[in-house]
Amino acid sequence: MATALSTLPSHPVRLFPRILFVLDGTGHAGVTTRINALHTAAKDPTLTLFLHTVPVLAAALAELHTNGPSEPVWHPVQDPDHTVPWSWSPHP
């Protein structure tokens, strides 16, 4: 008889697969400013391990409405000039 422990995956399971920031209420310039502020905060050395483990992405609510949340409208805070789908991960 299998126990609960014997059915656990052998690879680590991420409890927090990603953090998604949905930005609204400031217009395009304000959204860009907020994404740049997140990028600046992501440079904090105390966040290096966390950001290596957990993808942190930001997108404008208007882009989500227009294109859909699965489209590459999300900006990784470590590289805000690029857009990726929400399922993106820096590690395959």
Image (spheres, helix red, strand yellow):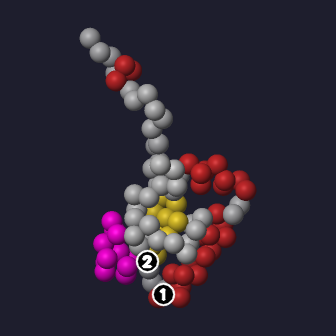
> Is 46 left or right of 89, judged from the image as shown?
right
Q: Position of residue 16 (x, y in %)?
A: 47, 48
Q: Residue at x 44, y 67 (%)?
A: 84
C-beta proximity under 8 Å, tags 1 and 2: yes
Q: Residue at x 39, y 70 (%)?
A: 72
Of the numbered discs 1 and 2, the one sitting upstream in the chain is 1
Q: Assign the N terminus to one quadrant of the image.
A: top left
Residue behind mark 2: 60
Q: Is residue 26 above or below residue 82?
A: below
Is residue 21 something that shows in the picture? no
Residue behind mark 1: 28
Stretch of the chain drawn in magenta: 61-71
Q: Quadrant of residue 79?
A: bottom right
SS at mark 1 in the image: helix
**Residue type for callout 2:** Ala
Q: Position of residue 56 (x, y in %)?
A: 52, 60
